[in-house]
Amino acid sequence: MTRRLILKIHPLSSQKTILSHYLPFSYIQKHSYVNVYMKWKQDFYLESIESVHRSIELRPILALKNYIVSVSPQEYSIPISAVSKKGIHFGVHIKVARFLRQYPSVFEEFTGPEHNLPWFRLTQRAIELHKEERDVYREFNDDLVLRLKKLILMSCVGFGEKKVLPLKIIKGMQWYLGFPDEFLTDPEKNLDGSFEVVEMSDGLTGLAVKNNNLNDRVLSVMQKNAIKRGWDNETIPFPIFPSKGLRLRRKIIDWWDEFQKLPYISPYENYNSQIRPDSDAAEKRVVGLLHELLSLFVEHCAERRKILCLRKYLGLPQMVHKAFERHTHIFYLSLKNKTCTAILKEAYFEKGAIDTHPLAKVRKKYIKLVKESTFILKRRRFSNRACGGGSVNVNAIHCEHDDESEKTELEAS
């Protein structure tokens, strides 16, 4: 039996009366809600973007790099004993010594001054990139502060008249937003004074924007582009980028055309819970918020499970992941690296539509440096073959070296 696409149409005849009773504005869903299943199609271009898919590998490397710099800002070197028990803290799930040896282009191993313990220091190229990264933080500090403000202003949680987000939630998104570590260690001291630390009702420490009138002046990427193109600021259509070779049924196309005509709700407007969560109007708000959120990130993408952590604080529905699956012309879901990554298509298919993050260029240079480790390890393997007259397992050497390092540490202690 031929499989058919099932479209469930739920009448909402009484919705207009209900919304008109509660809402002082005209976000009224006049159309039926169509439960659409959009077929996923692999996009080889988006699957090949290294800055997106090697971001997971780069994160623990830069975390260790930052720790080495903080502990030894002059020599950029530490003994392995300083990090051997902190692997989980850096997101490393193997022995730290073995992890560091996998990236000789970033971390250089040498024998320490005492007890012949192994030490690691940053390579000269890694030090140069670190300094370039710090220059970016200084030069584009205002841009990073604005991105933080925008994230908080998207919150539907208030502290009095101020928008607020828990600090632990912001720290969880720190990598994607491209903030330096000191941004959130002491926000009131390190930021520009427009933030304050508050105690939230659920016992969490939150970060609030002092001047809440700022949300009247903040425009989303969609609104800015609509102004440039001379579009109506009320019903802004989403730029779409269909996957090649994907054809949609007529009913889905008709539903999409009607969806595009709905009022655009800015993610910085106060969230009104009276909008029916099962309406297309509510769905367009969710899609607009996810579009704006991803536009703030360094690679304009994020692991989907990380975005789900924001659900409670950004007023997102329980089934927010459906927005990615139903709007494959706007978002792309990649299943690489044993995780699901949501990518904003507009950032990669329309140049100039979304501002490039200041840190994006530096991270690409870090990825290029990390890739050099593969060639260094290959040269070592061939060198070992030439010396030993046979093949050598590099992983076995690393494991043996790890055991010797731990034994030396125990003897020294």
Image: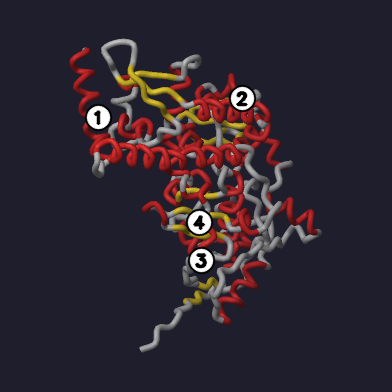
SS class, disc 2: loop
Residue corresponding to mark 2: 191
Residue corresponding to mark 4: 48
Nearer-N-terminus badge (3/2): 2
Q: Which amino acid, by three-letter code, is at mark 4?
A: Ser
- Cα gap from disc 3 to disc 2, whole angstroms: 38 Å
Looking at the image, which residue is at 58% across and 31% down? 208
Residue 86 location, x and y as percent?
32, 27
Q: Residues within 10 Å of mark 4 (few under 14, many from 20)?
A: few
Check if mark 1's residue and mark 3's residue have beta carbons within 8 Å.
no
In front: label 1 or label 3? 1
Looking at the image, which residue is at 70% across and 61% down? 236
Picture disc at residue 402: 1
Res. 23 image quadrant: bottom right
Looking at the image, which residue is at 25% across and 35% down? 397
SS class, disc 1: helix
Q: Which amino acid, by three-letter code, is at mark 1?
A: Asp
In front: label 2 or label 4? 4
Residue 244 location, x and y as percent?
56, 71
Q: Quadrant of the C terminus?
A: top left
Q: Residues within 10 Å of mark 1 (few under 14, many from 20)?
A: some
In front: label 1 or label 4? 1
Outermost residue to the bottom: 1
In front: label 3 or label 4? 4
